[in-house]
Amino acid sequence: MNEYEIQNSVLSKENQDFDVKRWLFRTLRFWYWFVLSVVACLFAAWLYLHYTNPVYQAVASVMIKDEKKGADISDNTILKDLGINGSKLVENEIEILKSYDLMESVVRKQQLFVQFWAEGRLRDVPLFGKDLPFLLEVLNADSLIASCTWILAYDAGRMKLTTGSAGVKEVKYGEIYFFDGVRFQLFPNDDRRVTHPGDSVIRTGIYNALIMPVPAATGGYVGKLNVGVVSKQASVVSLAIVDPHREKAVKILSTLIDIYNRQGLDDKNKVTSNTIDFLNERLKSVSFDLQNVEGQVQRFKTDHQITDISTDSKLYLDIARDIDMQKAQAQTQFNIVSSLERDLLLHQDSPTLVPSTLGLQDVSLASLVEKHNSLFLEKERIEKNKEIASENPRLIELGQQVQEIRRKLLSNVRSLKDAFEIALNDISRKDATLSGRIRNVPQLERSLLEIQRNRNVQEQLYAFLLQKREEAAVTLASNIPDSRTIVKARGLGQVSPKSKNIWSLAFVIGLLIPMVIMLIANFFNDKVGDAEEIEQKTRVPLLGSISHIKSIQSPIVIKHKAKSAVAEQFRALRTSIGFTGKGKEVKKILITSAQPGDGKSFISINLAASFALLGKKTVVVELDLRKPHIGKYLNITSSNGVSSLLSGKGNLKDVLIEIPDFEKQLFLLPAGYLPPNPAELVSGDQMRKLMVELEKEFDCIVIDTPPFGLVTDAVLLQRYADITLVVLRQGYTRKGVFEQLNQLAAQSADSPVYALLNGIGWKRRYQYGYGSYNAYGYGSGYFDEKDA
């Protein structure tokens, strides 16, 4: 197989599916880390649940009359005829419910800028309302600048206060005190909750109090409040808030809704109140005129002693009464229009609410007045909400609409004024005709008739204004809020921390922590792993594996009576090498590695020893002429060796050294002195002659060479070997060796390349257990790194 085919095969193997089963078995070897991690996380969850205050949630729902969505709280036609119109936009009302000013009113009313808690063994317990035996009322909430913390010791009705500036002071109910910039009073709490049947209202206890500025407390509660619509089609708004105290959360929502409804009702009452004030002023003026006319009648009759009028006078009086009634109505409408004109001109630069057009039958004018007042109130409410006023484009739009409507109102009023003036002129002409007829009546009777006519006009005008004032008063009393509470504020219970979720999360995290650590460690691991990895990443066959030995007494672990696991592994390796010849004898074995420290010298010695035990005369040729190690392992020093023979000095028999305990079947051909040109020596003709001579003398030749990844000596010597055995060390050799192995196999078609995994079990992550060896009763110890 050529190099191109090998590399393609490697790529295909690297892209194989992830072996879940193999990964699980490897992970489960570290089960104790998972147990420790889970226990630690569960303990942390227990601490969190016991040292964290629970958080409770309260909810409420409010339905708002929305002019877009057609929601109508009251279908009372009488109220509509009287001018009640509370249609609003849900979006604007949501902003008002979330506004800082509205929440500030709640904070002030409930004194939420004062917080109490009691210290517990595990955590501090928040207190509110009925939990306290006393009430603390701050009298200068607006002047608070900085927060302060107090300790109140309550014992049989006596209170001792510990402050930062005044130290310990005894305080009494009802008296005013001033400490740390706070002016306050204490009162007994008659609504205090009795926790036990025998618990009295007075109880000994120590309470901590935190007093903060109103803006700081308001900002905190605004952040906790959540307001939103239930659906796009509905005008129902849901409110929710969380707080460490269950009752406080419910109290905040209920107070918020109450203040919101009250403020909305106050806005509606402004229009009616303004109309009532206008009618009262007109009634005062008409009442004064009516009193003057009544006085004139009385004085005229007294002066002229008149008690009755003639029949003609009565007839003319009846006719004149009808004309006077028309004139009174026209005059009243003219006066109302004139008053509206003056009011519009007077407040042209600073618009205000326009009084209702009571008595005027003009539909367009009434519609404009109603629309003007509705827009003006909406503009005023948005201006009150400081948070949304500066950024709300609706405010500019409302201002422009108000000015436009006022211009239309002024134009309409002037048109009506001209119409009423024409009507008055027509009535005056009729009145002049009647007056000509009345001239025939005696002078006294005519004078009395004129005075009575004036009185009738004033009486009718007074009665009309009085009726309209009563109607406006009924409207004021009949005003209702534009919102209705659908769901009263109620608690939903504890929302945080949720014990089931915390326990589940802690368990999952406990499993994930060691798993993630293993995955990260495996991701950054660039060392050779187990045999399966070698088989997946390279086409070079794996002949065997050698376990890691924890302690070693001799560099040769396989001897006549050796029964260790490693000795058995060398015997298995010897057998596997025999099968590589496919019927032919494998005599010359070249052993190399990718980098120093992989244990090739140790493998060379013991592999040669395993062949010697079969009665084969074996020689270990130390051809690592750069850093030889076999002689050092065997405590053999010799200046003559392979380097001398390759230089043409000496002969083979003089440099061969017998290794004892192997019945003259195992020999070492040491490296000798270190030559300056080892690559040239091993590629010369003397090397070929040496190998021919060794083949005649020995049955098995084990060639120990330098790492092929560093120098070319091993590649140059491959032509003299029947097989090439590359030693890889588990957890030590870098994974870059896989590509080098494929290249080496591609370059050595005549000399098959095989791999040997050394040091198995040195890294615990690769330990799978070696029960097959332990079953024979062999030792299961592992090598030390240096000895391998």
Image (spheres, grey):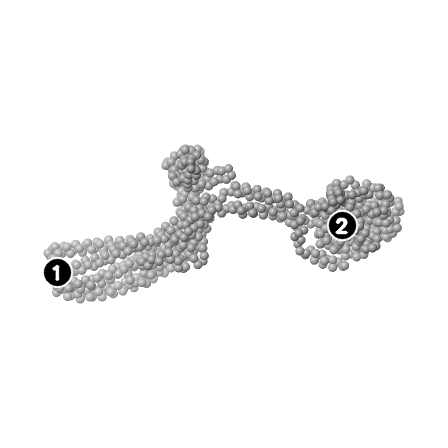
Q: What amino acid is labelled 2 in the image?
A: Gly
Q: Position of residue 582 (x, y in %)?
A: 81, 55
Q: Residue furthest left?
A: 305
Residue drawn where x is 17% and y is 66% of the image:
433
The secondary structure type at the circle numbered 2 is strand
Apparent side of residue 305 relative to residue 418 in the rendered image (left or right): left
Residue drawn where x is 80% and y is 53% of the image:
579
Determine whether 154 is above or below 513 in the image.
above
Apparent side of residue 72 relative to residue 767 in the rendered image (left or right): left
Question: Label 2 belongs to which residue?
Answer: 544
Question: Label 1 belongs to which residue?
Answer: 309
Q: Position of residue 248 (x, y in %)?
A: 43, 44
User: Which of the two labelled residues, at mark 1 and mark 2, occupies the earlier sequence position?
Assistant: 1
The secondary structure type at the circle numbered 1 is loop
Residue drawn where x is 81% and y is 41% of the image:
635
Quadrant that contains the N terminus? bottom right
